[in-house]
Image: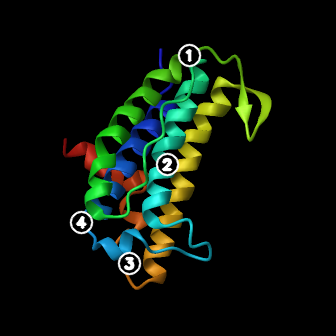
Amino acid sequence: MQNPLVQRSFKHMAWANGRMLEILSHLPDEAINFSARNPDWTVGKIAHHIITAEGRLISRVKNQSPPEEFPAPATANGIQGLISTCKERDAQLLELVNFPDEGHKFLRYGVEVEFLTSTILVQAVHHASEHRAQIADILAANQMDVLNLDEIDLWSFEMWERTQ
């Protein structure tokens, strides 16, 4: 039996990721290339990073090789291209919540480490949340307050669910 708290966390993450990508896909290309202090981490690269990290986390739980990397988007159209991969990976993560909580060995920053299934999966939720906040901040700092985190929080998710 699945834990409803865990299920809700992953369902919310998938919904919030999807909402964020939909918003980003309608912004001017300039906004996809906004960054904060580090010009290498643009809005597009951070959105891409959320999704590529999900692929690595899934592969770690399944004890598989990580998926092939794909280029980060620099346009709103490129963001649109991330949406289907994000949906697939978010669904795969939800399927993994019933995997046994056992150790998985993998390379992290070139060092072999071992982490529990639960740590890897919770990292997916935490990681996506922190980077959605980072994207919202970068956009707001560039006078584009279009990604309101209060509109993609758990309260908003439950209200959205009730309409489905």
The reply to whether callout 2 and callout 3 are in contact (CB within 8 Å) is no
Res 19 quadrant in image: bottom left
Which numbered circle lies on residue 50? 2
Whether residue 106 sits left or right of residue 60 in the image: it is: right
The residue that appears at 63% across and 32% down in the rendered structure is 120
| Pointer 3 residue | 145
The residue that appears at 55% across and 29% down in the rendered structure is 66
Q: Say above or below: 14 vs 57.
A: below
Name the amino acid, label 1.
Phe
Estimate the x, y position of residue 106 in percent, counting from the top left.
Answer: 71, 26
The reply to whether callout 1 and callout 3 are in contact (CB within 8 Å) is no
Which numbered circle lies on residue 99? 1
Question: Are there few (<14), some (14-19), or many (20+) residues within 10 Å of tag 3?
Answer: few
Name the amino acid, label 3.
Asp
- Separation of marks 2 and 3 at Cα, in angstroms: 20 Å
Front disc: 1 or 4: 4
Q: How many marks?
A: 4
Question: Which badge, 2 or 3, comes first in the chain's sequence?
Answer: 2
Q: Say above or below: 61 vs 50.
A: above
Front disc: 2 or 3: 2
The reply to whether callout 2 and callout 4 are in contact (CB within 8 Å) is no
